[in-house]
Image (cartoon, rainbow, N blue to C red):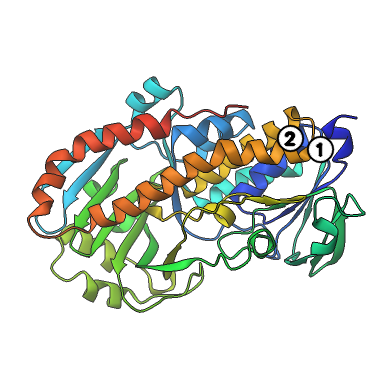
Amino acid sequence: MSLKQSLKHILIAGGGIGGLTAGIRLARAGFSVSLFEQAETFEGFGAGIQLSPNCVAILYEIGLARGLERLACRPERVRVRHWQSGRMITEAPLGRSIEASTGFPYFHIHRADLIELLLAEALEEPNLVLKQSGRVTGVDSDLATEGSHTDNIQISTTLGRYSADLLIGADGIHSVVRDYVLPDASPAFSGNVAWRATVPAAKLPPHLRAHQANLWWGPGAHVVHYPVRGGELVNLVCVVEEHNRANESWHEYGRPSELLARLAGWHEDILVLVKAIDDEACFKWGLFDRPPLQAWHRGRVVLLGDACHATLPFLAQGAAMAIEDAAVLTGCLQHEPTHRAALVRYQKLRLPRTSRVQSASRRNARVFHMDGPGTLARNLLSGAALGWTARWLYHYRSPV
């Protein structure tokens, strides 16, 4: 019996970017899949995200090329600037240059637009059933243990109880499924708070609407901004160090006036961006992190995305890692003889790369927020560091 025949039904907890990508890939590989999303609708909360070529290659494979071209922006370059003077520290080409070297473009897109594209593909899959308002509340451990009297895994949800042959936990940094796989692995507050907003481009001067990624390094803080939705909006992210623990939530409002006070003394361009934020469009949340997990699976349960490798956003790879996970997990389930072998191989292939991304993201948190004499050496080496990062990060392709 093939693995596809023995895995008659797969459950996915979480309808975000990673969960939807996994659902589409698995359904097209011939597996029967049910995906549970806790929200009433598959809406894309949040703001802008960056899609580098390593994950764009996978999104193109599932048919999103035309949609990405329509809804996303292609940045021509990334520019790093001094927080106060605006002096350019370094820059690196994106646009045609990155596409020529990797085979795929680099995109900026609103998270809601990417969810919309993934959802449209998911709704076309007869092997994929989407269940809204279906928050997973627990895993029945007595049925999930390897070698138990049953081959099924059962879960409790707000819609009732369900059973299947495999459960994928794509339910984010506060994953209920992870609590079964590896209890007591809660994320820790990183000491950084992210302020996010999207600003109508029409409210900004032309140079702040340019199709490029802008990164400003400052003491104890950094700022990123770039256009999304074809240039209609400018996505703004301000990350500041704070000692007080903050909530990890997409929905907690922040006051632009508070952020403006925190960024007093910063370059006028940054102040113009913050002053253009509407009160109802400003959100803040704490950034959480954890060391790499050593176990991504247990019995017939496996983790994906932030559920197993929550990544600070200082490398812009959170969505990309979840998309890569979905592709590799599907490939392993297609080609390995047993679910146990597939999950072991999946972890072996993904753990080193995601751990490296987590480590590099933590390092960037220190680099971006440096102050004092060390900033001179940092600035001199920054161009080489950007090029080196692009080589190992963006050229990745799924090995299965």
Q: Is residue 138 found left or right of 205 in the rendered image?
A: right
Q: Do the residues labelled 1 and 2 touch (CB within 8 Å)?
A: yes
**Of the numbered discs in the image, which one, if any, rests on residue 333?**
2
- Which of pointers 1 and 2 lies earlier in the amino acid sequence? 1
User: What residue is drawn where x is 63% and y is 27%?
Assistant: 400
Dot 1: element: loop
Would you identify the image quadrant in which residue 369 lies?
A: bottom left
Residue corresponding to mark 1: 31
Q: Is residue 209 above or below residue 160?
A: above
Q: Which residue is drawn at 17% across and 49% down?
A: 81
Counting other residues with Cα less than 10 Å from the Cα at mark 2, is it few (<14), some (14-19), or many (20 or more)?
many
Q: What is the three-letter code of the residue carrying label 1?
A: Phe
Quadrant in the rendering for residue 131: bottom right
- SS under mark 2: helix
In the image, is residue 52 above or below residue 177? above
Residue nearest the viewer, comparing 256 with 15:
15
Residue 284 percent coordinates (x, y): 41, 70
Task: Count residues near mark 1 (Cα–Cα under 10 Å), then give few for <14, some for 14-19, many for 20+.
Answer: many
Using the image, determine if residue 235 lies above or below residue 266.
above
Residue nearest the viewer, comparing 54 with 254: 54
At horizontal 57% and vertical 32% (from top left) the residue drawn is: 58
Residue toward you, 336 or 389: 336
> How many marks do you count on the picture?
2
In x, y percent, where is residue 96?
35, 25
> Of circles 1 and 2, which is in front?
2
Residue drawn at x 51%, y 47% as measured from the top left = 319
